[in-house]
Image (cartoon, rainbow, N blue to C red):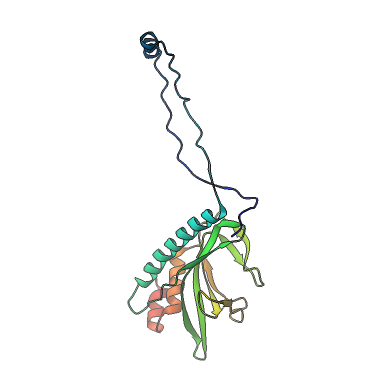
Amino acid sequence: MQTTGKLRYYEARGQKPPVAPTNKQVAHSEFLRTGKISRPNPIWMPAERLYMSYDEVARRTGQKLEAAGDVTHGRINGFHRTIQFPKILFHRTLDGSPHLGYCHVTAASTFFTPESRVSWSFYIANFFSEIGDGEIFFERINAQYSRMYFAVAIKGEPGKDIQINRTVRGNGLLFKTRDPKEAMKNVLMLGAPDHTARDIIKKL
């Protein structure tokens, strides 16, 4: 994991509450009693910044991504007992930007035609981007959007040497959306066992 770069990360801390100024009469009485001048704390003290390493940022990012993936998987499998997907959670963070990453949620295969069975994987990312056609998969990353849900056709085993199957739909992308409900609907459609189930899902 990269440890140097232009970006610096620090832990967000809550602002310290303001300190009420000392009453003048109370301060005068304290001086007469002890001979000491009471010097109140500043009304506001800026919070100290605790800088974090890239490894720590990546670790926290991964925890959040996998937590989101776990919740999403539970919602998908909770739709109907006939549509169940394996939970295959793992994450990756982007080189040089460990606050950005994506999480693999599940994988399965679907018959697009009676002769064509396509394996695919479903992911969540904490940014939005275009999906590239070449070696660079994420293009024009936009971190202003906190979620992107997408599924891609794959070759290989999830978690191992996965390759995008770009023979499917030109670039391997099955769907991409910022809408969690739309993402759930698309995944359910991929896993629907028959036309009757698909008709029900389409009406969601």
Q: Residue furthest right?
A: 134
Quarter of the view holding residue 23: top left
Which residue is at a point 44% across and 77% down the rendered structure image?
189
Q: Nearer the viewer, residue 107 or 170?
A: 107
Which residue is at a point 62% across and 78% down the rendered structure image?
170
Q: Is residue 133 left or right of residue 124?
A: right
Residue 146 percent location from the top left of the image: 51, 57
In the rendered view, tell whether residue 36 sits above or below residue 16.
Answer: above
Q: Nearer the viewer, residue 126 or 87?
A: 87
Which residue is at a point 53% across and 72% down the rendered structure image?
175
In the rendered view, tell whether residue 196 sits above or below residue 61.
Answer: below
Q: Is residue 179 left or right of residue 204?
A: right
Q: Residue furthest top?
A: 32
Name the image quarter holding the N terminus: bottom right
Residue 54 percent location from the top left of the image: 57, 54
Q: Nearer the viewer, residue 81 or 55?
A: 55
Q: Residue furthest left?
A: 81
Residue 36 percent location from the top left of the image: 42, 13
In the rendered view, tell whether residue 166 sits above or below residue 145.
Answer: below
Q: Residue furthest bottom?
A: 115
Residue 169 percent location from the top left of the image: 59, 79
Total numbered labels placed on residues in the image: 0
Which residue is at a point 49% across and 72% down the rendered structure image?
122
Name the image quarter holding the C terminus: bottom left
